[in-house]
Image: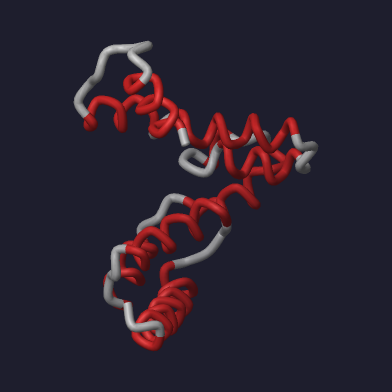
């Protein structure tokens, strides 16, 4: 959304064009904050707003929201790997080292089989959808 807004400004001649890499580097860190601010204006519960705002750094979320934010961070990391079509073993390996595990009091032994199962099911679904 922010990138499209920038493109419209350039098209209208209201700002100078910049390399796409520069725009993405400037916009990506803003996305969680902008999304969280928008959700807050819609009266979405603060637990959800904070999970969006701090999903890249759950330890920075308000104390009462850290556990939920860590769950969202873990899910987002796993979703990103699945979107990149990582193999189940790769997902399990990368998730095992995720910093949110400590906040969730989960061990590698406990999360690895879950990550493998989710990744395997995601691959089957992707295959079934022909992607």
Q: Is residue 88 left or right of residue 79?
A: left
The x and y percentages for residue 83 are 36, 64
Compared to 62, does 91 lie above or below?
A: below
Colour scheme shown:
secondary structure
In the rendered view, does 107 fall on the left or right side of 72? Answer: left
In the rendered image, the vertical position of residue 102 relative to residue 81, given as above or below:
above
Q: Identify the residue at horizontal 37%, vertical 11% (top origin).
A: 14
Closer to the camera in the image, 45 or 127: 127
Residue at the image position 46 percent from the left and 29 percent from the top: 30
Residue at the farthest front position: 12
Percent x, y of residue 121: 44, 84
- Tell me: residue 45, above or below residue 11: below
- Residue 3 position within the rendered picture, expressed as x and y whole percent measured from the top left: 39, 32
Tell me, yes or no, if residue 111 can be seen here: yes
- Quarter where residue 66 is shown: top right
Left or right of residue 56, residue 16 in this image: left
Depth order, front residue of 13/76: 13
- Pick the front one: 30 or 69: 30
Locate the C terminus and report the quarter of the image it occupies.
bottom left
Residue 118 pos. (x, y %): 46, 78
Q: Residue at x 65, y 38 (%)?
A: 50
Is residue 116 in view? Answer: no
Write down the quadrant of residue 53 in the picture: top right
Residue at the (29%, 63%) spot, across then down: 84
How many numbered marks, from 0 up? 0
């Amino acid at each position: 959304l922010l990138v499209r807004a920038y493109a419209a400004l350039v098209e209208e001649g209201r700002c100078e064009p910049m390399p796409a890499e520069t725009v993405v580097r400037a916009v990506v860190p803003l996305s969680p904050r902008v999304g969280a601010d928008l959700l807050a204006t819609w009266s979405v519960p603060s637990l959800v707003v904070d999970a969006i705002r701090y999903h890249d750094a759950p330890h920075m979320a308000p104390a009462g929201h850290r556990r939920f934010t860590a769950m969202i961070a873990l899910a987002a990391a796993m979703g990103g790997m699945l979107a990149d079509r990582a193999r189940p073993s790769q997902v399990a390996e990368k998730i095992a080292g995720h910093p949110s595990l400590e906040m969730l009091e989960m061990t590698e032994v406990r999360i690895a089989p879950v990550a493998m199962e989710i990744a395997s099911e995601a691959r089957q679904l992707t295959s079934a959808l022909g992607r």
